[in-house]
């Protein structure tokens, strides 16, 4: 992942550290990937993220996967805010941790040759969350838009359990 992240052009992708830790969850061994944001984060437009990916040295497969995810996010945000996809500005999603989550997933999909994903119903949670647009219900409108037609469940407590980045 660190080698893959080094292939991104220098577009202020700093102010973070990447680490991993091993854990056992319900008797299953896993490796947890962590992105810790250490500096102030800026907003990015959909166009600037597309440009960043286009000018990266990522493989074409990783670029394509990351671009598909960001496009789905932009389409959901455009729908929710009633703007054109080209006019979408990512606030929380434009931050380095979301970019690294999406690009890191694309890198791993290729490295592990993942062709198909199966999922159980996603736990959406409930309550409210603060965002750049103010207080939003949980699940957030963009999350709901992204998960249309997919299996979900609501009985998992008061917190945001699936973000727009995770949904995409």
Image (cartoon, rainbow, N blue to C red):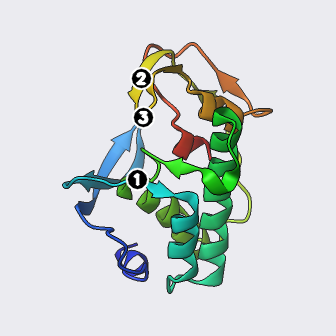
Q: Earlier in the sequence, mark 3 or mark 1?
A: 3
Near mark 2 (Cα within 10 A), the count class, few <14, some 14-19 or many ≥20, is some
Q: Nearer the viewer, residue 165 or 19?
A: 165
Inspect this view and state whether residue 32 appears.
Answer: no
**What residue is rendered at 74% in x and 58% in y?**
116
Determine which of the numbered discs, if any, sits on residue 43 in the image: 1
Near mark 1 (Cα within 10 A), the count class, few <14, some 14-19 or many ≥20, is some
Q: Is residue 13 left or right of residue 44?
A: left
Task: Check the image and report above or below for 138 versus 64.
Answer: above
Q: Position of residue 84 (x, y in %)?
A: 70, 49
Give the structural element (helix, strand or loop) at label 3.
Answer: loop
Q: Earlier in the sequence, mark 3 or mark 2?
A: 3
Q: Position of residue 161 (x, y in %)?
A: 48, 29
Q: Is residue 74 left or right of residue 134?
A: right
Inter-mark Cα distance, 3 to 2: 29 Å
**What residue is rendered at 55% in x and 74% in y?**
51
User: Which residue is situated farthest in the left direction here?
Assistant: 38
Q: Give the residue at mark 3.
A: 26
Q: Quadrant of residue 122?
A: top right
Q: Position of residue 86 (x, y in %)?
A: 66, 57
Near mark 3 (Cα within 10 A), the count class, few <14, some 14-19 or many ≥20, is few
């Amino acid at each position: 992942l660190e080698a893959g992240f080094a292939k991104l052009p220098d577009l202020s992708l700093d102010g973070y550290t990447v680490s991993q830790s091993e854990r056992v969850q319900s008797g299953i061994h896993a490796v947890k990937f962590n992105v810790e944001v250490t500096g102030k984060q800026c907003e990015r437009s959909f166009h600037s993220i597309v440009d960043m990916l286009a000018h990266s040295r990522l493989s074409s497969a990783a670029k394509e996967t990351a671009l598909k995810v960001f496009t789905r996010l932009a389409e959901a945000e455009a729908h929710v805010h009633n703007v054109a996809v080209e006019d979408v500005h990512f606030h929380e999603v434009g931050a380095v941790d979301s970019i690294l989550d999406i690009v890191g997933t694309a890198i791993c999909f290729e490295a592990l040759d993942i062709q198909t994903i199966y999922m159980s119903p996603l736990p959406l949670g409930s309550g409210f969350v603060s965002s750049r647009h103010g207080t939003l219900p949980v699940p957030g409108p963009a999350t709901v838009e992204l998960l249309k037609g997919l299996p979900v469940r609501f009985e998992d407590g008061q917190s945001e359990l699936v973000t727009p980045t995770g949904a995409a």
